[in-house]
Image (cartoon, helix red, strand yellow):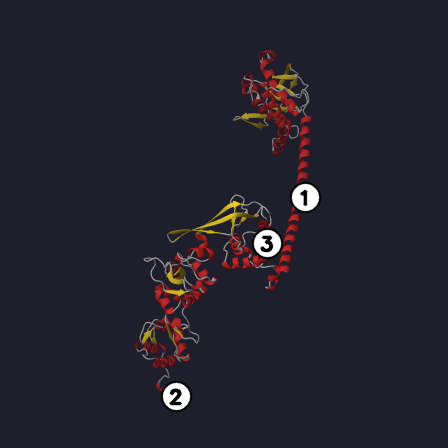
Amino acid sequence: DEAQTKLKIFRHPAAAAASSALLQNPPKTEEQAKKVFEYLTNLLGDFTANNLQQLKGAKIIPAETPRSTGLTLVKPGECYFKGDGQASFHSKLFTFVDFGSRANNFLAACGVRNAPTTEEVALMLIADPAGFYSLAGSAERFKAELRQIAASINDISPSTKQTMKRSPILLGSRVTDERNPPEKGGRRGSVAAEDEDDTIVVSYELLRPDQIVIIDDVNTYAQFRDILYGAPQEDILESLYASLGSPRLGHLIKEEYKPVGEMGDSTDAARLRKLVLERLPLFLHERHQARVLIRLEWMQNPSNFVVKKVQRLILQKTLVFGGKRAVKDSEASAAAKRETFNRTLILYVAHNIPLDLYEVANSLCKQLFDTPKVNDSLLFSTILSTDLPSLRRRGYNVDRILNQQKAEREARESARRAAEREAQEVAKREAEREAELRAAADKNVQQAINACRPEARSLLQNRQHMEVIKEALNEGYCDVSGMEGDLVLVGNVENIRIYAGKDIPNPRELLLQTKLDSIRRFITIIRPLKKVYKLPDASLHIFYDLSGPVIAFNAGGALFLNLRYYEGWHDAQLKQKEPMKAMISWFFTLAHEIAHNLIGPHNAEHSYYMNQISQTHLLALVDELQALQFGITQA
């Protein structure tokens, strides 16, 4: 060591020099490579990230590849370490190396990995689906690779998934009758075929995902199996196929049940309905409730779930897929459907053939679940067809499940009754409160009516404080500005006092002679309204002025109505024997003025009482209007 120090001779070359030497003269044999890589492991701590990155992309490892006939140099990033359980199949697709644990430490730093990623396997499959299948050697081995891809599907990039959806990488199977082979000129040759028995042949073909159906109804698949390629019936593979775009067979089929000859009430139908409702809790007990579309409690209502017996039940299934349309008719022993208008679930049972409880279970499962599975129908049919003691022996805790379901139903029923009682109490309290409010409002309305009085004065002065109704845009609204000028009593017409503005010349002659007919027609309107509101006698008054906005006003309970506005609005109608619009208009004017007996200012409270007063007397107004229309004299 002292001599090495004095002579500046180093035990090992620098990492940069070693890296350069390896790049310029990589080992040519596995034995040589093992020695070189083991030696370089000693220098591994001196290699920089740039050194290792440069080596990762360089062909420095001698190895046999799936496509080479002997040793060839490969990049560290293109090969993987052999493992004890390494499947021989992947060695046909990728390059695997093993130079011993010490040498492998250096190669791992250069980028050699333990195994290919799911993404890399998927890309190999996309690049050559037929070659991939050929290397797998059988349909079962190919499906094993698909299972591994399915288990790590989330590790595959979105772009690769999109390419998978467009590539013929999935295995589809078709069942054909040897006596009726597929038509010539159809699809290209199958990758494999298996004889199930003497007459049935199962052929496999690599197809795009959208060319393969997921078999969620074995009965339907049996009818159309000669024209369909189906996905393997395994949950993990069905999930893979669905994620890549394979449709479910049930979504491609349009079913139409044609019941023939309904037989009316039937003891068989009633017995089947009872059986279904009895066994349904056992079936649904372990089912995830999010999948269940129809609740047991809903079905227990006789109007929601109905069983009908018919003479025959024809099931027509129409398949539209891959540009082809096929229709199959068959006899069915049972079928369930939902009515469109009231959503009633009807289970039809045929009389002409023996009842198949599997068909009962299968048709109900299609209505019960959003995505029914084959196992659902098989399990439900078993539960329907097996007596309770046998179900107990098979491990079903019949009593516990039924008792639990009963307890849950009783708890829900108890909660429902409690909620109903609470709702009834709330409604009762609300009704009582509304009755109290209505009684108070009625009392106030009556108080307002009773507050109306006759005006005994012959001269009304200083009316700036009086509330008025003003006409604008043909709609009545209120204005508290008042009106200047005094009113004087000029006479009495049919027990109604008549007032006139002091600025009117010869008011007696004008009102008691010239306008007497108009006044009398006006009285034919206000007298029925006095009866509608049950106003005290002589509480209504008529006045006349030459100008101004005042339609009506309330002078301490005495109600004054303007003749000038009546003449302008309604007198022409009265001359034509059409009093109804006039009566309705002055009905609301009076309601407004009567409300001022309770509330002086024009605010929300005044509007509330005006509405209460008018609503309370609306039916009486309708009676008066009908009397006018048909010439009936009201008592």
> In the figure, residue 245 lies in which quadrant?
bottom left
Residue 425: image tag: 1
Q: 294 or 609: nearer the eye? A: 294
Q: Looking at the rendering, in which quadrant would you find the C terminus?
A: top right
Mark 2, residues whose alpha carbon is within 10 Å: few (<14), some, or many (≥20)? few
Circle 3 or circle 1, nearest the eye: 3
Q: Residue furthest bottom?
A: 3
Where is residue 178? Give x, y as percent: 38, 61
Which numbered mark, 3 or 2, is in the foreground of this view? 3
Graded by Cα atoms within 10 Å as few (under 14), some (14 to 19) or many (20 or more), the crowding at tag 3 reads some
Label 2, secondary structure: give it. Answer: helix
Q: Is the N terminus in the top left, top right, bottom left or bottom right quadrant?
A: bottom left
Q: Amino acid at mark 2?
A: Glu
Q: Is residue 413 above or below residue 13?
A: above
Mark 3 and mark 2: Cα distance apart in space:
99 Å
Report helix, strand or loop for mark 3: helix
Which residue lies under the disc numbered 3?
A: 275
Work out whether 632 lies above or below 191.
above
**N-term mark: 3 or 2:** 2
User: In the displayed structure, does residue 165 sit left or right of residue 530?
Assistant: left
Q: Earlier in the sequence, mark 1 or mark 2?
A: 2
Residue 183 is tagged as none
Which amino acid, mark 1? Glu
Marks 3 and 2 in Cβ contact (< 8 Å): no
Q: Quadrant of residue 537?
A: top right
Q: Position of residue 309 (x, y in %)?
A: 55, 48
Quick check: 544 above or below 442? Answer: above
> Which residue has dot 2 on it?
2
- Looking at the image, can residue 503 be seen? no
Q: Are marks 3 and 1 in contact (CB under 8 Å)?
A: no
Q: How far separated are the C-alphas under marks 1 and 2?
A: 105 Å
Residue 50 position, x and y percent, is 37, 72
